[in-house]
Image: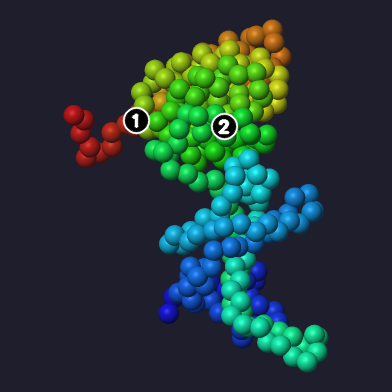
Amino acid sequence: METFAQTQRTTLKRLPKRGIYDRELVYRILDEGFICHVGFNIESQPFVIPTGYARFADKLYIHGSQASRMLRTLSEGIDVCVTVTLVDGLVLARSAFHHSMNYRSVLVFGQATLVDEPAKVTPAQMNRWCRDFDNWAICDTACFHLFDRTPHAWAKVTHWSSSNDEFVKRTAFALLWSLSVHDERTGDEPFIQGLTLIECAASDERNFVKKSANMALRAIGKRNRTLNAAAIAMARRLADSPNSVARWVGRDALRELTSPSVIRRLRPHSLTAGETSC
């Protein structure tokens, strides 16, 4: 019998014998239900929201609008508790104080992230989501876990980078940052063009824009030696800029891109004894 590991958080304190950790039984209860209650906390204010859900393998998918407070908050990676309860019968007594019920319930503890099917995400859907972003964590989560896997990612970097909206522009450079980390198939040229977009936005004093531009610059410069040289050259131009924001973006990036650890990681590996070159 395969069971879930008991932790301090999942171990029952009162009537512990009633707690069951059998994985098959837990899945059976989850599969029988269709409404769950999602508990989370915002600035010391607890919320419990009912919504639909479905289980697939060991993942629990909860329904909601990306613009909803619940999903926006959960996507920040906060702790969440999801409860499913099945009422099997009412136990009635002569006194209301002695009424009871027979029920089965599952409490799921964890953290949530936004999910979708990258191949089915449309440019219009990406635009709708992006317009709703009002938090850097939501923005970055969408970029790193969904947007960078869609076929529209590079077009959106260019499109959103010219926006005047702070979080739309943040999304452009968070997406470029994510592509720099995850996109192993694309050649250097799109990233060189990305450096141009970063240079154009480097004087934007808004906190969430300048930080994402800085992170994208650093990520591009760590892909390979060619992009490292291009990123360092651009970072030096920014470091010499009369604009204080651009200077910060450039100088902060230079510290990492010229650091011994980055240079060492990008250095071609020398042949060791027994190896031959082709």
Q: Nearer the viewer, residue 84 or 87?
A: 87
Q: Residue furthest top?
A: 242
**Residue 235 appears in which quarter of the rendering?**
top right
Q: Amino acid at mark 2?
A: Arg
On residue 185, the disc is 1
Q: Residue 131, position in %: x, y? A: 61, 30
In this rendering, is residue 17 above or below 147? below
**Residue 67 appears in which quarter of the rendering?**
top right
Query: How many residues crowd around disc 1 within 10 Å: few (fewer than 14), some, or many (20 or more)?
Result: few
Q: Nearer the viewer, residue 19 or 61?
A: 61
Q: Nearer the viewer, residue 53 or 218?
A: 53
Can residue 263 be seen at all in this image of the molecule?
A: no
In this rendering, is residue 189 above or below 9? above
The quarter of the rendered structure image containing the N terminus is bottom left
In this rendering, is residue 144 above or below 1? above
In this rendering, is residue 209 above or below 114? above
Q: Earlier in the sequence, mark 2 or mark 1?
A: 2
User: Which residue lies at the image location 40% right of the left edge and 31% below the top edge?
Assistant: 151
Can residue 93 be seen at all in this image of the molecule?
A: yes
Helix, strand or loop under label 2: helix
Left or right placement of residue 205 versus residue 175 in this view: right
Report which residue position mark 2 lands on. 128
User: Which residue lies at the image location 28% right of the left edge and 33% below the top edge?
Assistant: 271
User: Which residue lies at the image location 59% right of the left edge and 80% below the top edge?
Assistant: 88
User: Which residue lies at the image location 56% right of the left edge and 26% below the top edge?
Assistant: 173
Display colour scheme: rainbow
